[in-house]
Structures are given as C-alpha cells and as structure tokens.
C-alpha cells in the first residue's frame, strides 16, 4: 500500500512540463471564450433576461398569510432563487464553463473517500465521526480554479483556504482533467438540518450528480426521494455503488439497476466498487476507482460530451422553471383569495350588524323594558303632556314660562333611552366581532393574525375624539351621549329666544319629544313590531309623532344616530382590515409570476435549437 501511495505521488519532469503546457492552453482558451461570451450565446441572451426576471420576481415574492400553500411556496421560491444564482444563471452566461460534478449521498456512504481516491490525495476529511463533511469542498484542476474560486458559481458560499462553516473550500488537484470539478457535499440525510439544506442546494447547483451509496443502504428512502427530484429537474446522474461484497457483486448491482429502471433512471451510468482495504492515506485502490475516473476524464476531455451533459441538465432545469413558477403563482393567488375572503367576512359581519341596528331603531325595538317603564312614568306624572303643551302653538313661550320652575321633563326617560341605545350598539358590535373571530379562527391565516394581535378579535374601538381605546360599552355610551348632546344643540338652535329658564324648559321639552320621535316608529311602518307597534298606535305617541316640527327633528335625529353607529362599526371594520393590510399580501404578484413564467417558456423555445439538441 505504501508503495502505491508513493508511486501515485511522483511525477517526472516531462509530466510536469506537459501539465503546465495544458494548464496554460486551457486558461488561454477560457479567457478567449469569456471575451466573446455575449456574442456567442445568441438565443441564450433572451433566456438569460427571462431567468433574471424570474430571479427578480421570485426573490421578492412573499407569502405572508398562513394558508396551506404558503410554507411550500416560501421554500419553493427560496430554492428556485438559490438554483438560479448557483447554477442556471452562471451556466447560461457561460455555457462552455467547466462542469461541476456534485458528489452526494447518505451519511457514511463514502463520498469523501471516493473524492480523495479519484484525486489520489486525502483532500477531504473522512472518518467514523458523523457528519464528517460539515462544509463543502470543491476539487478542481488548477486551470479551472479561477472559475470556481471567484464565486461565479455558488455565489452565496464564501471561499476559504481551509474548511469553515458556510464556506466553500476550493482545492487544486493536478490529477483531475481540466473541464470538470468534484464537489464533496454534506450528507443528504444529515442529523444537522443546515447540512441537509445545504446538500440540497449544492445538488441543485451541479451539472452532474455523482450519487454514492452502499450495498447495505442503496434501498433507503431518502436517497431515492432525492434521486427522483434530480430526475424531475433533468439533472444528469451517475451512480457509484460502494462497499459491495465481491461474492454478491452481480446480484446487488443487478437489483440496483432494476430499481433505477423502475424510477426512469435506467440511462444513468452505474459503477460498482467492491469492499477493499484502504491504504495508509485512506484511499481506495486505483483499480477500483479507475472506471469512475475514466468516465469523468472522458467527459472532461470531450467538448461534445461535456456540452451534451451540461445541456441536458440545463435544459431540464430551465424546463422545470415554468411549472415551479406556476406553483408559486397558484400559491400567490391563494394569498389574494384568502385575504379577499377574510375582508369580505369582516364587511359582511358588520354590515349585518348595522342592518340590525337600523331595523331596530326604525321598528321601535328600544321602547321596551326599562324604557317602557319610564314611558308609563311620563304618562302618569303628566310630564309628557306638559312637554307637549310647552312646544305647541303660538303661546308655547308663555306656557314654557309658566312651567319654567318645574324640573327638566323626561330626564329618567332620556337616561333609559341612552342605556337602551348603548346596549343595542354593544350587542351589534359584539355579534359582528364574534362572527369575525369565529370565521377568522376557522382558518390558519386568520388564526395567525388573531394570535399576532388578539385585540382585533375583541369588540373594542377608539374612544371618540381621543387616541385611547375603551371597552365597547364605553364606546357605545360615549356615542349615545354625544348624540344626545348634538340633539340638544340642534333643538337649542331652533328654540325661540326668551328668558333663560323659559327657553331651557322649552328646549328640553322639544329634545324629549324629538328623542321619542327618533326611536318610535310611525304606525304602519313594516319595521314596527311588538311593543313598538303598540306604542305607535297610542294616543300620546300619535300626538308626539303628528307634530310636523317634532317629526322632522326626530327623523334628523334618527339619521344622525345611524350615521354615528355606522361610523363606529366602520371603524371596527377598518381596524380589522388594517391588520389584514399589515400582512402585506401582494395582489400583483400572481400576474408578475405568470408573466415571468411565460417569458422563460418563450425564451427556452427560442433557445431550444441549442439546449434541446444537447439534451
């Protein structure tokens, strides 16, 4: 073993000169290709523009609402952006650039050992401690070091001269043929989630996937899931079956070949490496890895074969962009639909509550309970009769003067009316808030918004005229108090001038009658039911409602009350819609994604003569 290792490490002077000549020629050819890259691409320039547009749209795509498709869409957008940055955009810009073969597989499959054995040097750490590969390592010929070292590919990974977290170590390996590089990726089933994620990103960035498995684990579920994903993306795959007992070589490799055929991967090259003892440097015997090495060298040396394989992978990756963007557009549409449904739920709930309030006010629904008791009290005490006298005919000023020393009429009735109206408003607000909370809480998106801001599920509103918040009861009481204040001011404006006490009594009497007119229905109104309809037919109510000036003022008061209630409920609607707006659903994203997908399809069709022929 030591003799093999020593022999492998020796290179005579003629070999060194030949290697230096080859390196210089490859660098010169690459530099020339880079200068006229844009002119040679032809149709690919439109493809590059289309992919850049997808990158721009997908990179800014947000799926903020917690609908069923959101999580998958976020992951899908991130994965698409990563593959565009790491692979598709660099490859379309430089179709002649060196190939990247990603060596991937399960934990302990022997990926690092295979890489070390192919370059005949222990460049990648291998051992029993798992996970061994914590940061990716890229091995390439010195002539390709500039391409892989200047972050033209895998731009999201910093370069390092030695392994580090989230860094890509680039190592020169003169024994590799220029034109292809090997990337030793973390385990696809690593116990470290970040390693699994990075492994997936690296596999999506490769022109070729060299999948390493073992005789004991080639049927595991996780590798086959990743293999199917590679097949769907059109990635070229080669299989290395490692640690195969010599006596079972044919049986195991035959079974694996049948499994590959069943998954549509029967065209993938299959290499079998028997169980063997590693040398002092932890390398496999050269003869065992020679078939893999010859195949990789042949791909690297043959420009036609290299273009064929890179074209196949690129064609498959680009072909998958359209459907991937379509799925993002569908998820974006789910966001818009969910936001629209939630907004409609809020508007409908509060519109129904407002309709109930209006129906109740017009139908005299508040004229019951405590209000009814206070009505009978008004009748029994004579206060209502006196109020009518104080507002009737040309002598009302003199009548008011005679009654000026009496207490303000109907105070207890007015208080009862205020409480009844406030209760009706509270009931309406609570009913709408409860309906919204139940409907939003029945869907993940709504539950997430309610969890983020529990106040939007509560029937509360800003206190009128201030920035503070109060309970719905406080808000309703303030609203009715402000309405009664407005009504008194409106009455005062129409009350004839006179002595203060006389004018005050006349104004209070008119306000009482206007309040009754505002909440009591006219007989025959279809909204009038129950006690309200009965009261509308009473003699005293008829006297109140048939006074033209009182009825006109009552209608104004009713309209003003409904406007104020409508504003309050509309503020509740706005408060919930603001929380929904804060989620920032992008309604234009659907169209931008679909346009971008269409541009890629059109550009790929125009580039098909180059990419399609290669594939």
Image (tube, rainbow, N blue to C red):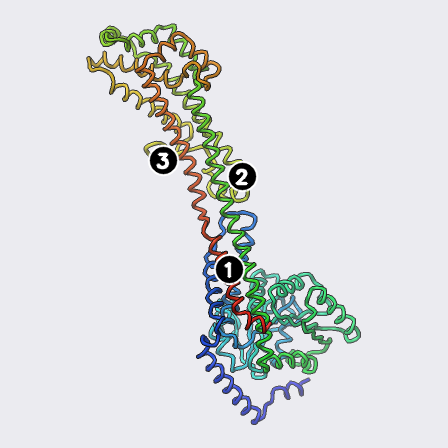
Residue 320 in the image, given as x and y percentages of width and height: 57, 62
| Residue drawn at x 47%, y 36% as measured from the top left | 346
Residues marked 3 and 2 touching at CB (< 8 Å): no
Mark sitting earlier along the chain (1/2):
2
Residue 489 in the image, given as x and y percentages of width and height: 27, 22
Q: Is residue 278 above or below residue 505?
A: below
Q: In this view, does 447 lie above or below 287?
A: above
Residue 285 figure quarter:
bottom right
Q: Distance between the residues labelled 1 and 3?
A: 51 Å
Check disc 1: other Cα within 10 Å, few if <14, some if 14-19, many if 20+: some
Q: Name the residue under label 3.
A: 468
For the question of whether residue 323 can be seen, the reply is yes
> Foreground mark, 1 or 3?
1
Q: Mark 2 points at which residue?
A: 441
Q: Considering depth in this image, is 568 or 52 the residue closer to the camera?
A: 52
Q: Considering depth in this image, is 505 or 26 the residue closer to the camera?
A: 26
Instruction: Tell me the SS state at disc 3.
Output: loop
Check disc 3: other Cα within 10 Å, few if <14, some if 14-19, many if 20+: few
Instruction: Tell me the SS state at disc 1.
Output: helix
The quadrant of the rendering that contains the N terminus is bottom right
Q: Mark 1 points at which residue?
A: 598
Q: Is residue 403 left or right of residue 545?
A: left
Instruction: Tell me the SS state at disc 2.
Output: helix
Q: Considering depth in this image, is 236 or 580 the residue closer to the camera?
A: 236
Residue 497 in the image, given as x and y percentages of width and height: 20, 15
Q: How many labels does the image show?
A: 3
| Residue drawn at x 62%, y 76% as measured from the top left | 115
């Amino acid at each position: 073993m030591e003799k093999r290792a020593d022999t492998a490490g020796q290179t005579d002077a003629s070999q060194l000169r030949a290697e230096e000549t080859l390196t210089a020629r490859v660098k010169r050819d690459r530099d020339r290709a880079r200068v006229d890259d844009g002119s040679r691409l032809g149709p690919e320039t439109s493809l590059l523009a289309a992919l850049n547009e997808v990158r721009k749209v997908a990179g800014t795509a947000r799926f903020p609402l917690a609908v069923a498709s959101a999580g998958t869409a976020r992951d899908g957008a991130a994965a698409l952006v990563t593959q565009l940055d790491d692979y598709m955009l660099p490859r379309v810009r430089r179709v002649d650039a060196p190939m990247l073969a990603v060596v991937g597989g399960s934990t302990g499959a022997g990926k690092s050992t295979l890489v070390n054995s192919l370059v005949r040097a222990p460049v990648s750490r291998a051992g029993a401690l798992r996970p061994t590969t914590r940061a990716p390592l890229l091995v390439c010929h010195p002539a390709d070091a500039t391409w892989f070292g200047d972050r033209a590919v895998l731009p999201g990974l910093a370069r390092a001269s030695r392994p580090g977290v989230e860094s890509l170590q680039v190592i020169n390996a003169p024994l590799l043929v220029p034109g292809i590089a090997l990337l030793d990726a973390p385990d696809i089933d690593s116990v470290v989630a970040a390693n699994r994620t990075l492994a997936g990103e690296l596999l999506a960035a490769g022109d070729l996937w060299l999948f390493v498995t073992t005789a004991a684990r080639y049927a595991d579920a996780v590798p086959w899931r990743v293999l199917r994903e590679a097949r769907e993306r059109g990635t070229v795959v080669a299989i290395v079956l490692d640690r195969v007992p010599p006596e079972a070589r044919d049986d195991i490799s035959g079974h694996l070949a049948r499994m590959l055929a069943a998954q549509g991967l029967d065209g993938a090259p299959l290499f079998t490496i028997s169980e063997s003892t590693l040398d002092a440097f932890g390398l496999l015997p050269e003869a065992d890895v020679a078939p893999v090495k010859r195949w990789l060298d042949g791909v690297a040396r043959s420009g036609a074969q290299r273009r064929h394989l890179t074209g196949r992978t690129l064609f498959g990756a680009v072909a998958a962009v359209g459907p991937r963007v379509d799925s993002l557009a569908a998820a974006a549409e789910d966001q818009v639909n969910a936001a629209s449904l939630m907004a409609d739920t809020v508007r409908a709930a509060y519109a129904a509550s407002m309709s109930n309030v209006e129906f109740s006010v017009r139908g005299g629904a508040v004229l019951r309970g405590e209000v009814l008791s206070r009505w009978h009290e008004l009748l029994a005490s004579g206060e209502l009769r006196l109020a009518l006298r104080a507002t009737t005919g040309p002598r009302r000023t003199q009548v008011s003067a005679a009654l000026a020393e009496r207490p303000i009429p109907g105070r207890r009735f007015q208080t009862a009316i205020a409480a009844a109206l406030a209760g009706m408003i509270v009931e309406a607000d609570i009913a709408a808030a409860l309906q919204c909370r139940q409907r939003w809480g029945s869907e993940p998106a709504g539950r997430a918004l309610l969890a983020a801001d529990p106040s939007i599920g509560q029937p509360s509103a800003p206190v009128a005229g201030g920035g503070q918040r109060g309970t719905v009861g406080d808000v309703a009481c303030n609203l009715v108090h402000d309405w009664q204040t407005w009504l008194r001011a409106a009455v005062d404006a129409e009350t004839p001038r006179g002595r203060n006490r006389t004018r005050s009594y006349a104004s209070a009497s008119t306000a009482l009658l206007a309040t009754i007119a505002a909440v009591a229905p006219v007989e025959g109104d279809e909204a009038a039911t129950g006690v309200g309809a009965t009261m509308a037919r009473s003699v005293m109510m008829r006297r109140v409602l048939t006074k033209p000036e009182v009825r006109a003022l009552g209608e104004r008061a009713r309209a003003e009350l409904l406007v104020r209630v409508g504003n309050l409920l509309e503020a509740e609607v706005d408060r919930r819609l603001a929380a929904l707006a804060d989620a920032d659903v992008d309604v234009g994203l659907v169209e931008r994604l679909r346009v971008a997908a269409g541009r890629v399809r059109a550009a790929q069709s125009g580039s098909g003569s180059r990419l399609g022929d290669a594939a």
